[in-house]
Image: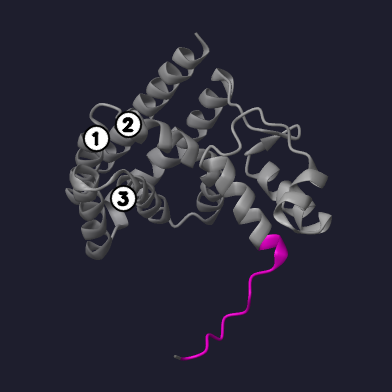
Amino acid sequence: MTQSNKKPRSAYHQSYEIIRDRILNGDLPGGTKIVEDKLARDLGFSRTPIRDSLRKLSYEGLIVDKKVVQPTEKDLRNLFQVRILLEGAAAKSAATYLPAEDLKSLANCVEIGRDGTTEDIMEANERFHEIIVQASGNSLMIETIARMKSIIYLFRKTVVLHNRPRLIDEHEEIYEAIKARDTEKAKQLMEAHLEEDLNFCLHILRSQLS
């Protein structure tokens, strides 16, 4: 066995990943109050890496006012408004610049979306959108989406676990438009796709509150 040259992850990175994953997996549900000292004791870290982790999670939108985020309708609409603007433009760029290798990756994401396990579908969904955003070549756009990555994951989880109708069909339509190098159609389809995601998430949110 060869010895790994990788350095052990810092306490900050370890604690950040643990807390983030607990939020994303629902172990720390929306509205849960975050108590720094308690987290430090529970996870076995000092307060400094916990504090740094919480600062990053706040930056990413997973923690708001020292509580796990519990998105309102306004929060959802604001998030998706940004996504629609950015990812619509990214889809237009992808239809112009996306190389053949990445087109194959998009097609693979669609295939997994139809036949994969729930976990596979979640990963393929994330990868599908990631490939298209990267195709923009716009570092600010990529950075903005990356900042929202964790909160976006929560909504992707909602649409996958609740089986949103036509989710993968829409991915395939976007892929076909990009493959055909139809820039306006790719943009319009992506915008419509995210509008449907928003409406579905709003429906789930309202049903949970009723």
Q: How far apart are marks 3 and 1 (CA)?
A: 18 Å
State which quadrant residue 9 falls in.
bottom right
In the displayed structure, 163 sits above or below 43; it is: above
Residue labelled with disc 3: 120
Report the residue at 60% width, 27% height from top. 70
Q: Give the range drawn in magenta.
A: 2-13
In the displayed structure, 93 sits above or below 63; it is: below
**x, y (%) of residue 204?**
42, 20
**x, y (%) of residue 66?**
75, 35
Report the residue at 53% width, 37% height from top. 26
Residue labelled with disc 2: 193
User: Along the horizontal axis of the image, is 74 left or right of 95?
Assistant: right
Q: Main secondary structure of the magenta part?
A: loop
Is residue 188 magenta-colored?
no
The answer to which of marks 2 and 3 sits earlier in the sequence is: 3
Report the residue at 41% width, 41% height from top. 87
Q: Give the number of the disc on residue 170.
A: 1
Q: Amino acid under label 1?
A: Glu
Count of numbered marks? 3
SS at badge 3: helix
Which dot, 3 or 1, sits closer to the camera? Answer: 3
The answer to whether marks 2 and 3 mark residues whose Cβ atoms lie closer than 8 Å is no
The answer to whether marks 3 and 1 mark residues whose Cβ atoms lie closer than 8 Å is no
Residue closer to the observer: 58 or 4: 4
The answer to whether marks 2 and 1 mark residues whose Cβ atoms lie closer than 8 Å is yes
Q: Amino acid under label 2?
A: His
The answer to which of marks 3 and 1 sits earlier in the sequence is: 3
Q: Amino acid under label 3?
A: Asp
